[in-house]
Amino acid sequence: MKVLFVCWGNAYRSIVAEALLKKFRPDWRVESAGINPAGFVSDLAKQFLAEENAEKYMKHFPESLEEKRLTEYDIIVVMEEKLRRMAVERCPSCAGKVIAWNIEDPYFLPREHAQRIFEEIKRKVLELVNSVGSF
């Protein structure tokens, strides 16, 4: 199984999802990317992943969606509906494997909001792990 997570900057949401899925399913190939990659990984992402014992699965630098061949993935998870449209525009044949989670971007939000978003991503990742038979 090959999964790609996509958000705007690849600094928090998609990186967190990638690290958690790698922790829960080390046998899957998991990557993440951003539409407009940030120059850093969020400090809160690092902290929350460390608390989850998943820091070792975290990448150290954001990557661009432009670097990814979307046809290679079995599942493409985008963090917002607008990103679904962008992914499908890049790869029309991928439309059936793009899933939108509609998870708020924690950038500029207080720590407690980022923590809530982390927990939401973790819940969604576990749902994905448990539903893989439906793809």
Image (tube, rainbow, N blue to C red):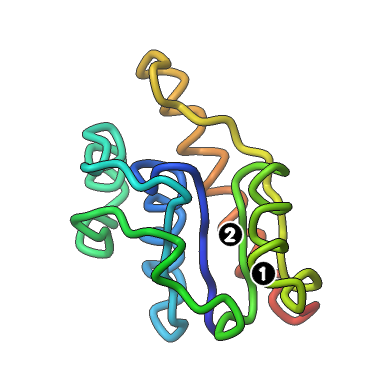
Which residue sits at x=39%, y=79%?
A: 26
Q: Amino acid at mark 1?
A: Asn
User: What residue appears at the point 73 percent right and 52 percent down from the top-left corner?
Assistant: 85
Q: Residue at x 62, y 67 (%)?
A: 76
Q: For this view, does 54 lie left or right of residue 10?
A: left
User: 50 or 9, which is in the foreground?
Assistant: 9
Q: Residues within 10 Å of mark 2 (few under 14, many from 20)?
A: some
The image shows residue 79 at horizontal and vertical percentages of 60, 46
Q: Is residue 105 left or right of residue 19?
A: right
Q: Are the residues flagged by discs 1 and 2 in contact, CB closer than 8 Å? A: yes
Location of the C terminus (image quadrant): bottom right
Image quadrant containing the N terminus: bottom right
Residue 40 in picture, x, y percent from top left: 21, 42
Say which mark, if any, is on residue 126: 2
In the depicted structure, whether residue 115 falls above or below residue 99 = above
Q: CA distance from mark 1 to mark 2?
A: 6 Å
**Residue 29, placed above or below residue 59:** below
* Front residue of 92 and 40: 92
Residue type at mark 2: give it: Leu
Disc 1 secondary structure class: helix
66 relative position to 78: left or right: left
Instruction: Return the x and y of residue 87 as percentages of the image width and height.
Output: 64, 60
Image spot of residue 19 (x, y percent)? 36, 60
Mark 1 lies on residue? 130
The residue shown at (80%, 77%) is 134
Q: Secondary structure at mark 2?
A: helix
Q: How many marks?
A: 2
* Label 1: how many Cα within 10 Å (few below 14, some 14–19, many 20+): few
